[in-house]
Image (tube, helix red, strand yellow):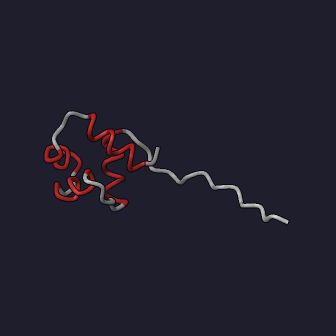
């Protein structure tokens, strides 16, 4: 599950309105509403939301290089 999917799920499941959550996290309500409607977030906003929900932003594991067919 991607980080954005995890954040959207946490927001839906928290039982708090988007407006109240935006105030609690220190993010703009319109930005949070757009995110919930499918738009992307800035990394700084994602970081604030992740911290609020106890999620950790970290680099993904590197993918192994693709092998060339002979």
Depth order, front residue of 17/22: 17
Counting every numbered tag in the picture gives 0
In the rendered structure, the answer to whether residue 7 lies left or right of residue 37 reads right
Residue that appears at 19% across and 49% down: 22
Residue that appears at 36% across and 53% down: 47
Q: Quadrant of residue 46?
A: bottom left
Q: Quadrant of residue 53?
A: top left
Residue with the most extreme right position: 70
In the rendered structure, the answer to whether residue 40 lies left or right of residue 67 reads left
Location of residue 21 in the rendering, given as x and y in whole percent from the top left corner: 19, 44
Q: Quadrant of residue 63?
A: bottom right
Residue that appears at 16% across and 54% down: 29
Location of residue 11 in the rendering, given as x and y in whole percent from the top left corner: 27, 41
Depth order, front residue of 70/47: 70
Q: Considering only vertical position in the picture, is 69 above or below 3? A: below
Figure quadrant of the C terminus? bottom right
Q: Considering only vertical position in the picture, is 45 above or below 3? A: below
Residue with the most extreme front position: 70
Location of residue 69 in the rendering, given as x and y in whole percent from the top left corner: 81, 64
Location of residue 17 in the rendering, given as x and y in whole percent from the top left corner: 15, 41
């Amino acid at each position: 599950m991607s980080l954005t999917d995890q954040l959207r799920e946490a927001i839906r499941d928290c039982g708090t309105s988007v407006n109240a959550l935006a105030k609690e996290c220190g993010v703009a309500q319109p930005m949070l509403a757009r995110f919930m409607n499918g738009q992307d977030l800035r990394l700084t906003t994602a970081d604030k939301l992740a911290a609020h929900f106890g999620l950790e932003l970290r680099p993904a594991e590197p993918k192994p290089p693709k092998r060339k067919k002979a």
